[in-house]
Amino acid sequence: MGTEITTTNQTSLTVWRKPSWPDALQRLVSSPSSYEGFPVVGPKTVEQLQAYLAHPEPPLAEPSWIETQLFAFKIKPHKSKSDMDWALLLRVNLTALSDFSRVDLGYAFGRLMRESKWFPDVSEIVEKAEYARWQREFRKKQAKDLIMKHQREWRAPIPDDQLCKPEDVAS
């Protein structure tokens, strides 16, 4: 799956990878089902879900990366604005976007690049980034619910040699 490389400071790099798991499991945690609509999953699936939940969150985006993305979208004041106005606008934009990971902002910038008819403003970027973060949080909630349903309802299958035979029941 995808890899995001983020710089945490000038000397070290943090590599964050999207968690990888089977497509069927991805569809299951992405579906809008509620607890009652979930299937009871087995122990192997629970292990995969727990590994997904243990996966670290993506790191926050660096201000320099956000600034580069804003320049790519030409989100800057008109030429008539002073340098002080530009610095203030940049600081406001960076503050508005600093709570998001590079992954969420990358999703937002990518979607807006394809969908926007005009250069987006920062509120549109925030809206798309919030949606990306919500999707990740939703999948984690669904994974927790599947684990809880397993813990409450899963029963080990009965081995064939312990099953009742029809003739035993008839007598």
Image (tube, rainbow, N blue to C red):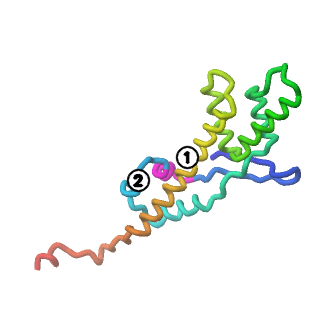
Q: Which mark is residue 34?
A: 2
SS at mark 2 in the image = loop
**Distance of mark 1 from mark 2, alpha carbons?**
15 Å
Q: Few, some or many C-alpha atoms within 10 Å of disc 1 (few <14, some 14-19, many ≥20)?
A: some
Q: Which mark is residue 18?
A: none
Disc 2 marks a residue whose amino acid type is: Ser
Q: Is residue 12 left or right of residue 34?
A: right
Question: 135 or 164, which lies in front?
Answer: 135
Q: Is residue 92 left or right of residue 132?
A: right
Segment tinted magenta in the rendering: 21-29
SS at mark 1 in the image = helix
Q: Is residue 155 above or below residue 61?
A: below
Question: 67 or 58, which lies in front?
Answer: 67
Q: Which residue is mark 1?
A: 135
Q: Is residue 1 left or right of residue 4?
A: left
Q: Quadrant of residue 67?
A: top right
Q: Position of residue 113 (x, y in %)?
A: 66, 28
Q: Residue furthest left?
A: 171
Q: Position of residue 121 (x, y in %)?
A: 68, 29
In terms of sequence position, does the residue under pointer 1 or pointer 2 come before the other?
A: 2
Say which residue appears at 78% left-offset and 40% top-offset: 65
Q: Is residue 62 left or right of residue 27?
A: right
Q: Quadrant of residue 116?
A: top right
Question: 90 or 46, which lies in front?
Answer: 90
Q: Is residue 62 above or below residue 72?
A: below
